[in-house]
Image (tube, helix red, strand yellow):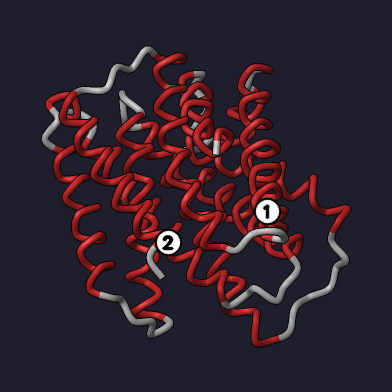
């Protein structure tokens, strides 16, 4: 959870070094792809898995990371973006009801509602007056992360290396094409990335995208999902602490109140079956 929480301030540091946000997301996925290629058996999945695998790869590899970087790019403060990412759980539950037909209990409906209320409270923070665009992109990031979790349930029988390689391939190629047409001067932008920025991008690819996820998969061998998932509520706490140490951000009273509402609601959503 420390690694997951660190992804936001580390990405912001790279963006502050003038790395274009879409290109940075593409390069992050490209590094993941390069590292995982030796572990791929070059075996395509069964036909029934193709559609959900493509949907999962685009949601996770393209949409989540591009909207994460855009939310940070258009925000002067990071902490609300981190808390906003917690909406992925309510969005995931709603998506599972719409796509998979799962029932949502009355308790879950209440917690989903309170999670969104917490975000509304944060919106009234005066410090966010110039950061609404960033929060909008953070909401889209959370939406597609929730969708990715739904699609991943249909892929539980596939090898995890295949899932990660697919995410890296789709993310790298699609985001590179988007960066070329939207941000322009792709080759020049890559040449202008300094060593510090490459280290920050490598950290995101290796520590966050690979190591943190592999550690979670390792825990799944010994513990149930219900025991592990509540710990996801810790990563915004670590992320906010890191933003304080790195950027000196001091949370306001409204942000603390809204953050407590969101994180508590998400934690309880994890615990309810």
Say which of 243 and 258 sits in front. Answer: 258
Classify 198 as above or below 146. above
User: Could you say where residue 113 lies in the image, as x and y percent from the top left?
Assistant: 19, 60
Relative placement, left or right, of 22 versus 108 is right
Residues at marks 1 and 2 touching, judged by CB atoms closer than 8 Å: no
**Numbered disc 2: secondary structure:** helix
Can residue 137 be seen?
no
Q: Which residue is mark 2?
A: 146
User: Could you say where residue 168 lies in the image, as x and y percent from the top left?
Assistant: 67, 53
User: Could you say where residue 163 lies in the image, as x and y percent from the top left?
Assistant: 68, 63
Q: Quadrant of residue 227?
A: bottom right
Q: Quadrant of residue 153?
A: bottom right
| Quadrant of image for the N terminus | top right
Classify 22 as above or below 104. above
| Quadrant of image for the C terminus | bottom left
Q: Which residue is mark 1?
A: 219
Relative placement, left or right, of 15 versus 88 is right
**Numbered disc 1: secondary structure:** helix
Q: Quadrant of residue 72?
A: top left
Answer with mark 1 or mark 2, whichever residue precedes in sequence.
2
Can residue 206 be seen?
yes
Count of numbered circles in the view:
2
Q: Which mark is residue 48?
A: none
Classify 119 as above or below 190. below
- Residue at the (41%, 59%) spot, across then down: 270
Closer to the camera: disc 1 or disc 2? Answer: 1
- Residue at the (42%, 23%) spot, across then down: 241
- Using a 10 Å C-alpha cutoff, classify the residue at mark 1 as few (fewer than 14 neighbours), some (14 to 19) or many (20 or more): some
Say which of 180 and 101 sits in front. Answer: 101
Relative placement, left or right, of 69 versus 71 is right
- Using a 10 Å C-alpha cutoff, classify the residue at mark 2 as few (fewer than 14 neighbours), some (14 to 19) or many (20 or more): many
- Residue at the (88%, 53%) spot, across then down: 38
């Amino acid at each position: 959870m420390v690694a997951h929480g660190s992804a936001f301030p580390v990405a912001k540091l790279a963006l502050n070094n003038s790395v274009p946000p879409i290109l940075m997301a593409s390069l992050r996925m490209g590094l993941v792809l390069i590292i995982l290629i030796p572990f791929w058996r070059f075996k395509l999945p069964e036909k029934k898995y193709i559609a959900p695998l493509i949907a999962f790869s685009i949601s996770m590899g393209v949409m989540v990371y591009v909207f994460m970087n855009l939310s940070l790019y258009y925000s002067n403060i990071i902490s609300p973006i981190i808390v906003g990412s917690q909406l992925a759980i309510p969005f995931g539950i709603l998506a599972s009801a719409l796509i998979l037909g799962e029932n949502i209990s009355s308790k879950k409906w209440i917690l989903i509602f309170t999670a969104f209320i917490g975000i509304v409270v944060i919106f009234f923070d005066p410090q966010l007056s110039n950061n609404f665009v960033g929060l909008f992109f953070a909401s889209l990031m959370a939406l597609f992360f929730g969708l990715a979790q739904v699609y991943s349930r249909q892929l539980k029988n596939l090898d995890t290396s295949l899932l990660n390689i697919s995410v890296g391939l789709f993310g790298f190629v699609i985001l590179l094409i988007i960066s070329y047409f939207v941000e322009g001067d792709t080759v020049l932008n890559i040449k202008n990335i300094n060593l510090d920025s490459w280290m920050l991008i490598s950290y995101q690819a290796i520590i966050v995208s690979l190591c943190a996820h592999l550690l979670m998969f390792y825990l799944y061998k010994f513990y149930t999902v219900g025991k592990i998932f509540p710990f996801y509520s810790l990563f915004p706490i670590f992320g906010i602490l890191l933003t304080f140490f790195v950027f000196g951000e001091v949370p306001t009273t409204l942000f603390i109140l809204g953050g407590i509402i969101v994180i508590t609601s998400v934690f309880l959503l994890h615990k309810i079956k």
